[in-house]
Image (spheres, helix red, strand yellow):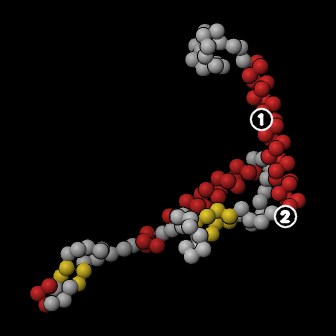
Amino acid sequence: MNSNVIGAGLGISLPLAEEVGPEYFDETDREEAVAAGVQLVNGLRKFDIELDGIGVSPVCDKCTVLREAYVVELGHLTPAEAVEVATKLHTYDAEFRRMREEIKALTPANPEGKEGAEGATSTE
């Protein structure tokens, strides 16, 4: 609120307040949480992982110490579903490690002590 007051001569103190528009009710925190959830779902889908029940919920001020206004909930998984997701992640992890080692084996050692192809200049 504005500290300026009107009506001081009348013995009444009325604060001057700026009017608000529809943006006053925008939920930027929720929009940010939804955007984060969308990124997460799209990232998981790249690994063929679908989580049912994923959503965005307001944080309960009385039952948590989180400072965020909204959280992305991953839903509920049965033990079998959790094992399925973990298996997929471990499979991708193993493949990424294998590919990394293969790339390292194919990358010639730099005699100047620099790792990989960083700092290398093109001869084209």
Q: Position of residue 82 (x, y in %)?
A: 83, 57
Disc with the residue nearer the chain's start (2 vs 1):
2
Using the rendered image of the protein, determine whether residue 29 is visible from the camera's viewpoint: yes
| Pointers 2 and 1 in contact (C-beta within 8 Å) | no
Drawn side of residue 11 relative to residue 114, left or right: left
Q: Quadrant of residue 17?
A: bottom left
Name the front one of labels 2 and 1: 2
Dot 1: element: helix
Q: Is residue 10 above or below residue 41?
A: below
Distance between mark 2 and mark 1 Cα atoms:
27 Å
Q: Amino acid at mark 1?
A: Phe
Give the residue number, with chain letter if any, for mark 1.
Answer: 96
Residue plotted at (61% across, 13% down)? 113
Relative to the observer, which residue lies in front, 21 or 81?
81
Q: Which quadrant, please, contains the C terminus?
A: top right
Residue at the extreme right: 80
Q: Which quadrant, please, contains the N terminus?
A: bottom left
Instruction: Determine which of the numbered discs, if any, sits on residue 78 in the image.
Output: 2
Q: Is residue 119 above or below residue 18?
A: above
Q: Is residue 42 above or below residue 66?
A: above
Residue plotted at (60% across, 10% down)? 112
Dot 2: element: loop
**Around disc 2, counting alpha carbons within 10 Å, would you say few (fewer than 14), some (14 to 19), or many (20 or more)?**
few
Residue at the extreme left: 9
Q: Amino acid at mark 2?
A: Thr
Drawn side of residue 31 relative to residue 100, left or right: left
**Around disc 1, counting alpha carbons within 10 Å, would you say few (fewer than 14), some (14 to 19), or many (20 or more)?**
few
Using the rendered image of the protein, determine whether residue 122 is visible from the camera's viewpoint: no
Q: Position of residue 44 (x, y in %)?
A: 74, 51
Q: Position of residue 105 (x, y in %)?
A: 77, 19
